[in-house]
Each structure stands twice: as structure tokens, then as C-alpha cells.
Amino acid sequence: MALDTPRPLVLSNARVIDPARDLDAPGSIIIADRTILAAGPEAANQGAPYGAEIVDCKGAIACPGLIDMCVSVGEPGAEHRETLASASQAAAAGGVTTICTMPDTDPVIDDPALVDFILRRARDTAIVNVHPLAALTKGLEGNEMSEIGLLKEAGAVAFTNGHKSVKNAQVMRRMMTYARDFDALVIHHTEDPDLAGGVMNAGLNASWKGLSGVPREAEIIMLERDLRLVGMSKGKYHANLISTSESADVVRTGKKRGLDITAGVSINHLTHNENDIGAYRTFFKMSPPLRDEDDRQAMIAAVADGTIDIICSNHDPQDVETKRHPWAEAEDGAIGLETLLAAALRLYHSEQVDLITLLATMTNRPADRLGLETGRLTKGAPADITVFDPERPWVLEKSTIRSRSKNSPFEDARFSGRVIRTVVAGKTVYAYS
């Protein structure tokens, strides 16, 4: 992302929401030198900096820019699926100002030089903040530990094996212990590969469709193992994508034990269930698989009560060559950067999650977990801001999708809530007209 200094900016007549301060009040946001000078009611009566651009938000919500902790891109190695540039354009349109990129590229991001490559490419081509996640194990093969110290020094903000679980418990224990010594966060995909051989959620629906199922226990067993290892290693751990009610119970128990753990969920598992697969629509094929309605409701309840800390898009672009296949042969994955906020607002409109809690899962909580300065509207914080109208209706049309891949489960979906302006480091990178 370019570091040119934009002119000062004042977002006036806004409903300012800053979950980090539990603030929800009318006010303004004043920005200069890429940082926030003031935000909230106290800013409404302050004068604008000399030469400032003044934008009337007309009562729209202004909140910290969203942070997406689980974004796959194709660069390097599969740029036809997605590049850092195209992913950043999609993110900006969705109000996402920071993306954390997964290491499952070609080559895998398991070397400090490759972390540096991602950061340099992002500076040159992306319009939002890009933070690379580095591989937990060499080549994501689950056998040999990565050089966490060197990777973190190069700029990796956390460590993950991507969409693969580390099967070997001894390797995982050593990784957690090693990561602890560098105060590094381990992010893990909790799915036992020996149990997760199916292609959709195990149950009657899978039987009726003639498809092999992934039992809920594949996730639960791996998660329970991981939390035992966290207890042994005293490390920092994030369960990236949980999807079952019992997984939420496991996380609750782990937190009561005082473990340094957080949990995340994909927006897809909060807004869809296995019935949405319909006539084998492969855009709904993902890992973990969409579960039943009881699990979906349990995930929403876990977000509302704070058991689940973070909501992400699990943006995973796949092109027609990997998606236009029979269900069992199609690749997992769906895009989601452009629809993350709009889809999440469904939980607010249905009165299942209050707005401050909902926004916290995508702003200050991921920022705190990753040790980022963003995600809040305090004086001196980076001026990363999203302005949106929670009531404005719109439809996601395939022709307007900014990602290079178009595999969205929300294609032709109706939303209430549209991003109006996205600001990164004080510069407007997206404005809806």
C-alpha cells in the first residue's frame, strides 16, 4: 500500500461506533497525517484541520476498519484465482481495511524471503493493509517446524498450517512451545484428517444426497486435543473456524480453565446451513462443511455471548476449473471479502447479536489478538475507517464482484447494509456512488 500522505479528512455527522471504547454516539472523526486526531462526540465541535476534505456522513455509521484474519489469495503461484491487488479491491468494497493472508500459496510462505515478498507486493499493489500469516510447518506438511523467530522478525503476524490440520500431536506440542518463546500466535484448522474424509456434513441430508459425510467429531476431537496441548505448552492459540455447538462448549471450558485461547467462525457458518447446498451448488462446498440449523444457531449464540471472539470471511477464491465439477470432486472454498460486513449485519437485523458486539468481532478483537494498532478509533491510532449505512438495500450481482474468482455463496443475495466509504491510513480507497 502506498504511503503517500493524503490531505486531512473530517467525517462529520456520523454515528460513531468504537467497540474498543464501548462507544456508540453521534459525532465526527478528524484525521490528519494518516492518524486519528479525535473521534466521537468530542470531535463534533472541533475545528477542521487546514485544507481538510469534509465529508457529511448523513447519519451513517463510522467504525474502525474491518480486519479479516482468514484470507486466501493466489499470489504467488495462482494469480488467475486472486492477486493481492484484486483481493484488496474486494476488501475495500466490503469495508475491510486489513487482511491477513494464508500461507498456502505456491511456494508456501515458510521462508522469511517469502514473507518479505508478500509485504513488498502489498506495498506496491494493494490498497488495504496486508499482513502475512506464515506456515507452522515446512511446506504445510505437518512434519518439520518452521523457523518462527525468523518468520516473525520478517513480518509474519501469526502462524498457521492453512486449511490443513497438524495431525501429529507431538509436532503440534513442540510448535506451540516454540511459538510461546517468541510470543507468537498459533492459528489452527481443527479437523482430524482421518475422520474428515467426506464432502459435506454427516447426517440425513448427506445420506439423501448420496454423499459421504464429515462428522462433527472430526472437529471436536481435534479441538479438544489442541486445548490440552495449549495447557501443556502455555502458548497462545486461536481455533480458526469452528462450526459445531459442542466445539463452542469446548472453547467455553478452555476459557474457564484460563487458557490463552480465542475462537473464530466463518460468516458462511453464521448465515448458511447444509440445506442451502440445494441442487449440489458447489459454491456452498467449504471446509469445515456447512452444518445443520441447530449448529448454525449455536454459532450465533456463541458470538453473542463472547465464546466466539472473531468473525472472518474465510475468503478462498476458486475458479471454474476447480468449482465446475460434480460436488464430490469440486474444491472447497468461497469468496467473501466483499460481503463480510453485509452478511454479518443479518445477525443484527434479526436481533440475534447487538451491533457493538458484532463489530467488535471484526475490529478490536482481531487487532488485539494479532497485536495490531488498528481496530479502534482512539487518538493516535491509524486512520482505518469504514462508513456504512446499515439499512441501505442492495443485491450482489456477479458482474460487480471485484474478486478475480466469482465463487460466492451470496450471488444474487439481498442485503440490508452497504459500505459507503472505506478509509485506509487516512486515504479514501473506496467510495460508493
Image (spheres, rainbow, N blue to C red):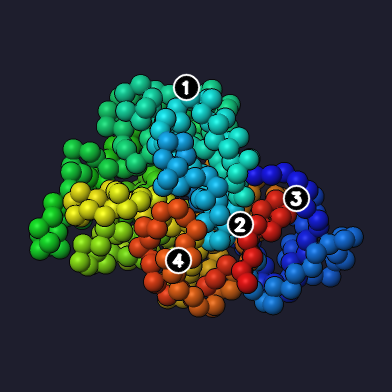
Quickly name the residue at label 4: 399
Amino acid of disc 2: Gly
- Residue 325 placement, left or right of 26: left
| Disc ID at residue 147 | 1
The crowding category of the residue bearing disc 2, from other C-alpha atoms within 10 Å (few below 14, some 14 to 19, many at least 20), is: many
Amino acid of disc 4: Ser
Amino acid of disc 3: Arg
Precedes in sequence: disc 2 or disc 4: 2
- Name the residue rendered at 20%, 66% in the picture: 279
Residue 280: name its quadrant: bottom left
The crowding category of the residue bearing disc 1, from other C-alpha atoms within 10 Å (few below 14, some 14 to 19, many at least 20), is: some
Tell me the distance, in whole angstroms, between the alpha carbons under discs 1 and 3: 34 Å
383 or 331, nearer to the observer:
331
- Name the residue rendered at 14%, 59% in the picture: 206
401 or 273, nearer to the observer:
401
Picture coordinates of residue 169, whole percent (x, y): 29, 29
Tell me the distance, in whole angstroms, between the alpha carbons under discs 1 and 4: 43 Å
Picture coordinates of residue 413, whole percent (x, y): 39, 72
Question: Circle 4 — which element?
Answer: helix
Precedes in sequence: disc 1 or disc 2: 2
Quick check: 47 above or below 365?
below
Question: Circle 2 — which element?
Answer: loop
291 or 3, nearer to the observer:
3
Precedes in sequence: disc 1 or disc 3: 3
